[in-house]
Structure formats: structure tokens, C-alpha cells
Amino acid sequence: GPHHPETLRARHGAGVGLGRLGRWKDALAESREVAALRERVLGAEHPDTLVSRREVAVALGWLGDWAHALTEYRRVADARERILGADHSETLAAREDEAHCLERLGHLKEAADLYGRVASLRGHGLAGGA
């Protein structure tokens, strides 16, 4: 049926395909609809819902709407941090998306701080100074 997780997975893939074709307005519309359906069917913090939320953010970014993209990227990163922990690879990737978005908005210090936090959590920070 239209709300079955596998149907929504296929629709998610269709939205990604629209983006790859450069049809970002269509990709955004499909991603928003799939994200809303997944949230109702699976829950707001289900991994599939979060993947769809990230696709919404990606489409918004390609359309130049970085302020709204930032809201979505943060929503995904915050949820992943709550569920998986701050140092999980998926959380760190989500924080990098957030930092990239901050760069696009010209918030360079905030972006640099976030990149630094991610690097530190990955264990790539400077150990012991010098």
C-alpha cells in the first residue's frame, strides 16, 4: 500500500533520482512528502525518516535555501546524537552536513568550531597540544 515502508523506500529512491537529474523542486516535494509519511508511519526518529529529512535538506541546499536546510540538517543531527551518541559515525556525518550548511550561510566561526568538534570526536584532534 501507499504507506508501507517498502513503498516509501521506493519513493525515497525516486526523489533521490529526481535530484540526480537536477530536478530539485520535484525532488524537494517528493522528499518532503516521503519524510512526512515516514514520520507518521515509522516515527520522527526512525532511521528511514531521518534519511528522508536529510534529503529534504539536500534539496533545499541545491535550491539555495540554506537557512531552511540548516533547520533540517540540525534536526537530523540532533536526533542521531540522541539515538546513537555524539561520537557515532552517522552523527558525525550529520554534524559535518550542518557545518557545511553553516559555511554556506557565512557563519564561518560556528562552522569551524563544529568541524573541530567533529574532528575531536573522531580522534583526529591534536593530542596533547603542540
Image (tube, grey):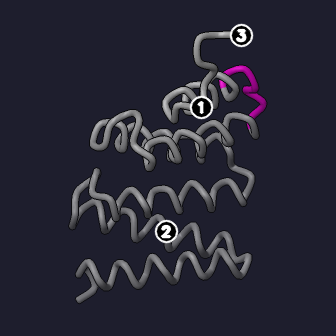
Residue shown at 73% from the left, 26% from the top? 107
Give the image location of residue 75, x and y in percent: 43, 42
Kindly indicate the quadrant of the structure image that contains residue 77. Answer: top left
The numbered disc on residue 28 is none
Relative to 112, 49 lies left or right? left
Quick one: SS at disc 3? Answer: loop
Residue shown at 53% from the left, 70% from the top? 29
Residue annotated with mark 1:
124
Going by the numbered disc 1, the residue's amino acid type is His
Q: Residues within 10 Å of mark 3 (few under 14, many from 20)?
A: few
Residue 107 higher or lower than 7, as above or below: above
Quadrant location of the N terminus in the rendered image: bottom left
| Residue numbers of the magenta segment | 105-110
Quick one: SS at disc 1? Answer: loop
Give the image location of residue 89, x and y in percent: 45, 47
Going by the numbered disc 3, the residue's amino acid type is Ala
Residue annotated with mark 3:
130
Q: Nearer the viewer, residue 21 or 121?
A: 121
In the rendered image, residue 126 lying in the magenta stretch gets the answer no
Kindly indicate the quadrant of the structure image that contains residue 128. Answer: top right
Mark 3 or mark 1, which is nearer to you?
3
Lower position in the chain sequence, tag 3 or tag 2: 2
Kindly indicate the quadrant of the structure image that contains residue 17. Answer: bottom right
Residue annotated with mark 2:
31
In the rendered image, residue 108 lying in the magenta stretch gets the answer yes
Relative to 110, 90 lies left or right? left
Q: What whole-number distance in Å separates the C-alpha atoms at marks 3 and 1?
A: 14 Å
Mark 3 or mark 2, which is nearer to you?
3
